Image: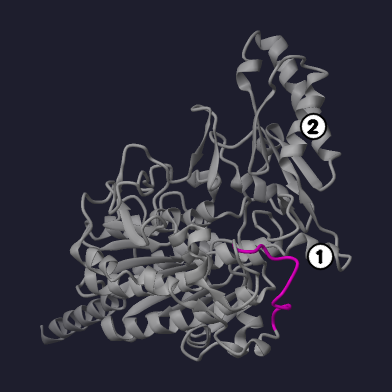
Amino acid sequence: MKKIVAILFLAMLSANSYSQQKPKLVVGIVVDQMRQEYLYRFDSKFSEGGFKRLVGSGYMLKNAHYNYVPTYTGPGHASIYSGTTPAVHGIIGNDWWDKNAKKSVNCVEDERYKAVGNPEGNGDVSPWRLLSTTITDELKLFTQKRAKVIGISMKDRGAVLPAGHMANAAYWYDSKTGKFISSTYYLNALPSWVDSFNSQKLADNYLNQTWNTLLPIAQYTESGPDESPYERKLQGAKAVFPYNLKDLRKANGDYELLVNSAMGDDLLTEFAKATLNGEQLGKDNDTDFLTISYSTPDYIGHGTGPNSVEVEDTYLRLDRNIEDLLKKLDQEVGKGEYVVFLTADHAVADVPQSLKDIKIPAGNFPVANVEAGLNDHLQKYFPGKKVIERMSNDQVFLNQELFAGDPKSSGIDLLIATELITNYLQATDGVAQVYPKAIVKQGSYSEGGTKGMIIRGYNFKRSGDIIYQLEPGWITGGSPQGTTHGSSYTYDTHVPILFYGAGIKKGSSSQYHTITDIAPTLSVLLQIKFPSGCTGQPVSEMLD
């Protein structure tokens, strides 16, 4: 009898020990527009407590990629947290042409809800267009809604999509007031701690400062010259340091200027720390989840490109912000009591003009001119008829009503129009490959190459009728300054994935992993169900 009791006692201890392995808090950090190579290029100037702490004491996936196109912010955040791709979760872009409503829609737009915190703010949002659950949803379901889930970002989509359908709240920066706001989808009034934070007017404090380089500018040898012909300029300023933000506010949208300076990350970090205290995250027996999306690197990266001093300085300052945040987590939650993962929603292309000037193939794809030329071409075969409804996100949406008459004749006309458009685009400078919808239907979700990435990014209810892929180095847009992202090429797909904290062993892996592996890995760590549409796999070499 004593032996049986002893065995039961040991079993109970083992079970308790097993359950205690769960972290008190998970913090998901998404850096908007971060290349994996930034961790290497800027390493010598990072502090010991920021990125280096995550890399040296955590687990890094060195060969992590997006496995679909388009590589945009909305789909990226949705894929990270749902563990699947746009083919399943439905977020096919930041904005897309709604074939039923006949208008362009935003990925988090929802007219049923209003802003909370500023009646004029962009608060008519919700996650309703996200078709699958997220890891944050699954945590809420597992804990019978006891777990707290909060999403924060400078962008609404960066806060809303990671937080999922069941979040306690999501907050984002309001560029009209410099405050953080929310939506009536979550709550009817801001909590007192958010009002208290907003009352500090930190946005004004930052915008009354000068943005200068963190280190002496001569040390920024990992970047090109500060004065460069490839960078877009703020109104009333040269694209060189220092930036007197106070003098530039009026000409650059007042509070909108903050996200175009590294101080945008400072504000979000301060809000993250206030969120930890205000919501008392990680203070009870149920794991909580805080999602943080740093949007400022994307704004700056679009304007100045990945080789600018501005981008390097932004990441050196972000490194210090992460160090500050980790110290706060140590204090409030406890070392070894939380898990942090860090990744990016996409990477970025080099400025095409900068590549052309050193004889590397690249270019700018003038989509408006191409669409106009394509419409003129189609008039020869369909005179007086509007064949194309919209070109959006490297997709062509056909006017289906035009082909909705007699099934026999309209079917032939649709095939003819598709073939005409395909051939025209394939012959257009800068276009690499063109895929009609019928070709996508014939493919498999597990297919490799560009076609497989298109299939995994293609949602049959929402995506267009013809998809095209640009040549390497090409981007949509005609300006010789600035850059963007969205392609299937490695400069857009290769992003960092770092895990750190409770239950994470130290190390790294050069095995190929996809962004959709993050959510199921967290599911294993938290011992909860995978998200409903999950197609990724846990990172076994880190967990086993």
Where residue 330 appears, as percent x and y from the top left, is: 32, 85
Q: What residue lies at 30% left-to-right and 43% top-to-bottom?
A: 114
Mark 1 neighbour density, 10 Å: few (under 14) some (14–19) many (20 or more) = some
Position of 12 relative to 435 (above/below): below
The image quadrant that residue 201 belongs to is bottom left
Mark 2, secondary structure of its residue: helix
- Judge whether 324 appears above or below 351 on screen: below
Viewer-proximal residue, 380 or 151? 380
Quadrant into which the N terminus falls: bottom left
Q: Amino acid at mark 1?
A: Leu
Residue 13, percent across and down? 21, 82
Question: Crowding at label 2, few (<14), some or many (≥20) Cα neighbours within 10 Å?
Answer: few
Residue 353 visible in image: yes
Query: In this rendering, is residue 189 above or below 384?
Result: below
Q: Residue at x 69, y 32 (%)?
A: 438
* The label number, if any, that marks residue 56 in the structure image: none
Question: For mark 1, what is the residue?
Answer: 355
Kindly state the secondary structure of the residue where label 1 is placed: helix
Image-based side of 448 in relation to 334, left or right = right
The residue at 66%/39% (across/down) is 395
Q: Is residue 459 left or right of residue 396?
A: left
The reply to whether callout 2 and callout 1 are in contact (CB within 8 Å) is no
Q: Residue 318's spot in the image, x, y percent?
A: 50, 77
Residue under pointer 2: 373
* Residue pictured at 31% horizontal, 73% vertical: 25
Q: Is residue 225 magenta?
A: yes
Is tag 2's residue or tag 1's residue first in the polypeptide sequence?
1
For badge 2, the amino acid type reads Gly
Q: Is residue 84 visible?
A: no
What colour scheme has been applied to the protein in the rendered image?
one colour
* Magenta part of the chain: 222-234
Residue closest to the eye, 82 or 104: 104
